[in-house]
Amino acid sequence: MGWKEAAEPVLTRMPAVRRPEGHVPFKRKLAWTAGILMLYFFLTNITLLGIEAGQADDLFGEFRAVLAGEHMSLLQVGIGPIVTASIVLQLLGGANLLGLDTDDPRDQVLYQGLQKLLVIVMTALTALPMVFAGGFLPAQQSLTLGGFTFDHTQIQLLMFTQIFIGGVLILYMDEVVSKWGVGSGIGLFIIAGVSQRLVTGFIQPTEGGFFYNWYLILTGQMEIGSLVSGDGLSTLLMGDGGQIIALLTTLLIFAIVVYAESVRVEIPLSHARVKGARGRFPVKLIYASVLPMILVRALQANIQFMGRILNSQTGDQTVISLFGRELPWLGAYSDGQPTGGFFYYTAPIYEPDDWMWWTGEIAQEAWMVMIRIGVDLTFMVIGGAIFAIFWVETTNMGPEATAQQIQNSGMQIPGFRQNVGVIEKVMERYIPQVTVIGGALVGLLAVWANMLGTIGAVTGTGLLLAVSITYKLYEEIAEEQMMEMHPMMREMFGKE
């Protein structure tokens, strides 16, 4: 008996959100989407019961904008477990180790059940070290609720349960949006988190905000002349109080992504039976979208997660040790951040202060910083291309699946025989190459944006994701509105 037969009773019984039986009106889709978004913000503002206030260390840190959620809230793990489970399934599926045919309805149910089970397991594995290891989410020593007093261990179990429930909730919130709303829940949560950070980072009149220095000038706490003398100009351009370069980088990323989304190769199509019916199949420059970047950054986040967990077990030592042996090549830490070894070189560049060694604020030598930049660039460019290929193949966007979709719609490429194999060969001229180029380009943009900084410290990847997802959401809303006005088009595109 194979693994599918053994696991089928469990995987087919995983709770699932029921699919709508018929067409869901556009206004109802918007209502579901808005409702889930409000629930998301509500859950991110519920602080974990039993946590020691002001003592928690965010293990995800700079990856928080990409992985959504909110530190010390019910949604502590964010979409991290969902993304990690997707990475595992994509790698297993790419190596053909699962033996699942996604065109078979039975295997589709098994795949979805397996994905849910993996997310639940990953949620537990992510929450355990956060609560029980290294004091990342320290629990209170005692807590009294309803006349019952919880001790330290019981409070830790209570916190773990809350984080676990939050991780499961975000899984099903994503499923509700995917089936009953507009777009995807994961994309919606990323937009919400990044937008909140962007707006806060832009308007807050406190240190770290774009208007901080301008606020000091308007209130008479700083003279204009001090901004152009000494280090004032440098602070205005790149410091926490000015961030002019960060603003320009943010605006430039917006422009580049919107432009890249419009760059495409359009393959002409004509209907085999309806004379004069023509169309075009667009192969965009960013064909796989920016979503594979979540997988790349999530992989980096998991590597850094492991490093901080290992470091937390060494007490006050700065060098990671295993089984009583110090391993400086694996990682050295200071104030919870890697300063050398494997975990330093594999840590992404988060902000300008991570690589501008000539300022004298970086303890590492120039060659160490250059290696770190090189590793980050290589990881993002090559990883972006590889995960883009995985994404295209697993989401039925590859040449074979695309050719089959065109054939099923009754369309053909003018000048070629109406044959799936012929259409596939034409698609193979464009899709694989564009997928690799687009994935590598997005990875390069993400590193470049991090090196120059962004408003609200949303990171280059977070900004790329927010802009691209918002653009696609706009396109999807426009498509839904068009189909609402012209019901016949729903039948043509199989949206009923």
Image (spheres, rainbow, N blue to C red):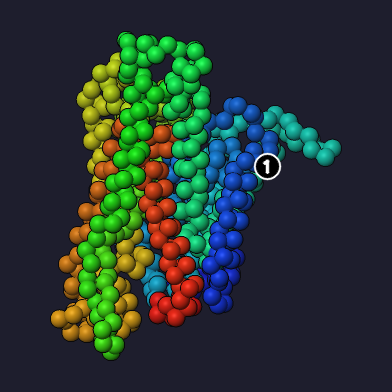
Q: Judge left or right: residue 163 versus residue 114.
A: right
Q: Quadrant of residue 479?
A: bottom left
412 relative to 247, above or below: below
- Residue at point 61% right, 31% down? 138
Instruction: Pick out the residue farthest to the right.
Output: 147
How many discs appear?
A: 1
Q: Which residue type carries mark 1? A: Leu
Report x, y in % for residue 11: 53, 68
The residue that label 1 is drawn on is: 158
Q: Nearer the viewer, residue 232 or 177?
A: 232
Q: Nearer the viewer, residue 293 or 280?
A: 280
Instruction: Pick out the residue farthest to the bottom.
Output: 273
Q: Residues within 10 Å of mark 1 (few under 14, many from 20)?
A: some
- Residue at point 32% right, 42% down? 253
Report x, y in % for residue 246: 35, 32
Q: Is residue 157 in view from this perspective?
A: no
Q: Nearer the viewer, residue 284 or 73?
A: 284
- Residue at point 38% right, 27% down? 243
156 relative to 416, above or below: above
Report x, y in % for residue 340: 32, 26
Badge 1 marks a residue whose secondary structure is helix
Report x, y in % for residue 393: 31, 65
Q: Is residue 258 in view from this perspective?
A: yes
245 relative to 273, above or below: above
- Residue at point 26% right, 87% down? 275
480 relative to 309, above or below: below
